[in-house]
Image (cartoon, helix red, strand yellow):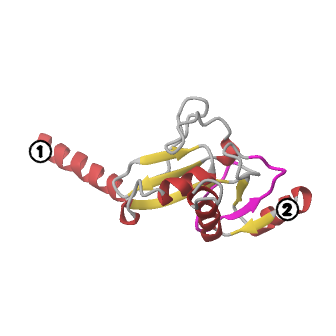
């Protein structure tokens, strides 16, 4: 009876854990970006996608997270949450709540130069010292779509 009860609690714990995926640690310098396959080496630009089944995908740049979604690698209903790391601290924030700065003075691994901030004040502070444009997550997605998924005139 005790073995059955123990098995029941193990299964229950697994089900509860799968229903509430948590952000996972990224092993910088070891893991590859799920989109571009570069080694994730700069924590300031990293991001993560969690699925409803508890799987996580790590990215070396915010633009890679956006491109991964845009490229149709995952259905929207499979996504539990999207996370970005604050450029100015070690805090993680849901991408939809973050504030982003596109600044040519803050060069990201994939060169769209997008950094994330947990609050608007921090984004504005970096904007004052590094210039650039503050964006919301939807605008980041639009920018990635425009820059990486729209054929150019020279290369249709």
Q: How crowded is mark 1: few (under 14 residues within 10 Å), some or many (20 or more)?
A: few
Alpha carbon distance from label 2 to label 1:
59 Å
Q: Is 152 displayed left or right of 77 in the figure?
A: right
The quarter in which the N terminus is drawn is top left
Magenta segment main secondary structure: loop
Please name the residue shown 22% across and 49% down the image: 11
Q: Can you name the residue that lies furthest to the right here?
A: 129
Query: Where, by quadrant of the figure, is residue 50 drawn?
Result: bottom left
Please indicate, yes or no, whether residue 21 appears anywhere in the rendered image.
no
Q: Position of residue 10 (x, y in %)?
A: 24, 45
Q: Report helix, strand or loop for mark 1.
A: helix
Give me the residue at 79% from left, 66% from top: 133
The answer to whether residue 110 is magenta is no
* Residue placed furthest toward the top: 30
Quarter of the C terminus within the rendering:
bottom right
Q: Which residue is depicted at the point 70% across and 46% down?
A: 44
Range covered by the magenta-colored residues: 90-107
Q: What label does residue 127 carry, if any?
A: 2
Where is mark 1, residue-wise? 4
Q: Which of 24 and 76 is in front in this view?
A: 76
* 91 falls in the magenta region: yes
Contact (CB < 8 A) between labels 2 and 1?
no
Query: Percent x, y for residue 68?
Result: 50, 53
How many marks are shown on the rendered structure?
2
Residue toward you, 150 or 17: 150
Dot 2, how many residues are within 10 Å of its Cα: few (below 14), some (14-19), or many (20+)? some
């Amino acid at each position: 009876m005790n073995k059955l009860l123990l098995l029941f609690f193990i299964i229950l714990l697994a089900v509860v854990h799968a229903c509430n995926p948590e952000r996972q640690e990224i092993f910088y310098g070891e893991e590859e970006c799920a989109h571009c396959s570069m080694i994730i080496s700069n924590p300031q630009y990293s991001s993560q996608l969690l699925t409803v089944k508890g799987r996580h995908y790590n990215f070396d740049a915010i633009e890679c997270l956006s491109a991964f979604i845009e490229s149709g690698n995952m259905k929207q209903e499979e996504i539990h949450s999207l996370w970005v790391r604050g450029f100015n601290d070690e805090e993680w924030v849901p991408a939809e709540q973050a504030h982003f700065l596109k600044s040519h003075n803050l060069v990201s691994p994939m060169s769209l130069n997008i950094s994330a901030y947990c609050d608007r004040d921090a984004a504005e502070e970096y904007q004052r010292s590094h210039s650039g444009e503050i964006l919301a997550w939807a605008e980041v997605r639009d920018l990635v779509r425009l820059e990486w998924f729209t054929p150019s005139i020279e290369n249709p």
